[in-house]
Amino acid sequence: MPSIHGGTFFAANNVTTAESVIHNHHGETGINILHRAVALDTLCDSADSFPQPRCHPETRTKMLDDLYNWTVGEGSVLPIHWLHGPAGAGKSAIMHTLCQRLKNAGRLGGAFFFKRHHPTRGNAKVLFATLAYQLALNNRQLKPSISQRVEDDPSVVGRGLDIQLHNLIIEPCKYLKDSAPPILLIDGLDECETHGAQVEILRRIGSTVGQHPMTFRLLIASRPEAHIREIFDGPSFHGTLVSTNVQQSFQDVATYFRDEFARIHREHRDTMGNVPTPWPSPDSLESLVCKSSGYFVYASTIIKFVDDQYYRPTERLADVLNLATTDSDAPFAALDELYKQIL
């Protein structure tokens, strides 16, 4: 049952306020208290995240391998990694793919996928409690410690970010013995509710890292917004941070186009049976890759447009190829033209 303390209501399952204070019902475990406070729809395999963005096979392979090797690397590895790039670069696809790979390998500590304007996935207040809940489920060494801390002080799940981070993650992880460091993923930090909340999260992480040794690894993905870059470039993260820029990849976009157009050709047999392969022509494919500026957001939008079951793929592709070429230097000018066509 939900609790009321000092006139403040604590709502069950996924809707939490900063002022919420939980009472420990008789016999209730700390894990159960955490479960009621966390945002389950922020997890990488939650129903809310389907369909999940994933990297197409044979794309982003080196970047995924480099990130995975950083997460599982031994020795003096810098404990925090910032993955940054513009909108449409494929950051979330990379994070979801890496998350699943870590989960399959038994190395995932926890993940939080922010989503702009979402009631819980945009909420900074449940970030660290949600990560702690996953740590407890995924690591048998950590579960007793995290659960006991919540039982001793159930109000911790509604307290400040610094207290949640320290009590539910930093302190329990300090006592890990002979164990590989847990891996925590935070995707879409720039989609958290406000700039102020984004800065607050980074400041709490930075100040905590400066006071305590990092016994876990943290990968954060976001756009390179000025207020985020300013914090990462500041003294709080000096000596603890490595960063990776998700740049354009014309080769990966070409691979994606070839594979997806081949699939469309196979699956639309009724209308594509007499269309010779390769389809589209090499010149048309090259034109599409150039228009994409190397970004997957353009490529995936085209594939969705052409793959519509109610239209002939050849006609839809012709519509895209016939779009006026803009002289603008804007990287997403071609995407703007495509959206105009779709709408």
Image (cartoon, helix red, strand yellow):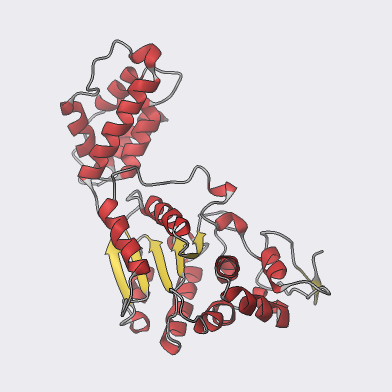
Outermost residue, right direction? 26
Q: Which residue: 81% across, 74% down?
A: 27
On screen, residue 318 versus residue 327, left or right, reads right
On screen, residue 173 versus residue 334, left or right, reads right
Count of marks, rendered view = 0
Q: Which residue: 29% across, 10% down?
A: 274
Instruction: Tell me: residue 287, above or below residue 120.
Output: above
Q: Out of 221 and 137, give the one closest to the viewer.
A: 137
Q: Looking at the picture, how far across and down is residue 124, in whole percent?
A: 55, 67
Q: Out of 236 and 142, give the one closest to the viewer.
A: 142
Outermost residue, top direction? 274
Q: Which residue: 31% across, 79% down?
A: 75
Instruction: Tell me: residue 48, above or below residue 168.
Output: above
Outermost residue, front direction? 178
On screen, residue 303 versus residue 175, left or right, reads left
Quadrant (top left, top right, bottom left, bottom right) of the N terminus: bottom right
On screen, residue 162 versus residue 54, left or right, reads right
Q: Looking at the picture, how far across and down is residue 151, in whole percent?
A: 72, 78
Q: Looking at the picture, how far across and down is residue 128, in whole percent?
A: 56, 71
Does any portion of residue 226 appear in the rendered image?
A: no
- Among the 4 quarters of the image, the one containing residue 99: bottom left
Quadrant (top left, top right, bottom left, bottom right) of the C terminus: top left
Q: Out of 163 and 264, give the one closest to the viewer.
A: 264
Does any portion of residue 110 appear in the rendered image?
A: yes
Q: Which residue: 24% across, 29% down?
A: 324
- Among the 4 quarters of the image, the one containing residue 297: top left
Q: Looking at the picture, how far across and down is residue 312, in whole percent?
A: 37, 17
Outermost residue, bottom direction? 211
